[in-house]
Image (cartoon, rainbow, N blue to C red):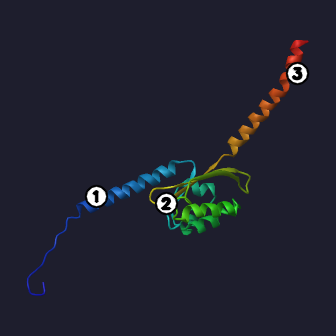
Amino acid sequence: HPMGGLLLLFSDITDELKLKAQYNAQIQVQQATLDKLSDAVAVFGADGRLRLHNEAFAKFWQISPQQLEAAADFEGVVDLCVPKLHDMGLWRELKGRVADPDPSARAPMSGEVKTSDSRIVAFQSRPLPDGATLIAFTDVTDARKLESALAAREAALAEAEPFKRDFVGN
């Protein structure tokens, strides 16, 4: 102390350390949960920065994790994804969902698009309570092919029905 003596201050930071540990545990659980999903998932903060992504996201877009970490914002991630999905209108729409602070502009959106490597991709965006936005992509190519094959088979069966009736009738 300037006037002589010694001044000691003590502060109990037990609660602060406990909260920090709980927060870190929650982030680890969140990341582990995302990594177990087969859908490609990325979470962007209200500032447009990439907060979380899962391993499936990098595999889906055929991007190395290092490239994804280097492209820390939405624009950087789009630059990495554009070679596979050229639809700039979709990317602008998704950017509006991520960056616009207006709650009505951040409404959920979903749809399907075709990529340059002939995959059919279902996408969806969902606003999160903290102002972040979750964007998920799923490859639905096999499901659509199966639906098409089943529809073709149903049409063939419907077309053959009159012939069957005539045959049985004769």
Label 1 CA crowd tier, 10 Å (few <14, some 14–19, many 20+): few
The vertical placement of 161 against 40, above or below, is above
Of the two numbered discs 2 and 3 on the same chain, state the one appearing first in sequence: 2
In this orientation, does residue 123 appear?
Answer: no
Across and down, in percent, residue 144 comes to 71, 42
Question: Residue placed at 88% from the left, 21% from the top?
Answer: 163
Label number found at residue 132: 2
The vertical placement of 111 against 78, above or below, is above
In this orientation, does residue 102 appear?
Answer: yes
- Give the secondary structure at mark 3: helix
Q: Which residue is mark 1?
A: 18
Rounded to the nearest angstrom, the CA distance separating label 1 from label 3 is 76 Å
Which amino acid, by three-letter code, is at mark 1? Lys
Label 3 CA crowd tier, 10 Å (few <14, some 14–19, many 20+): few
Q: Which residue is mark 3?
A: 163
Which amino acid, by three-letter code, is at mark 2? Ala
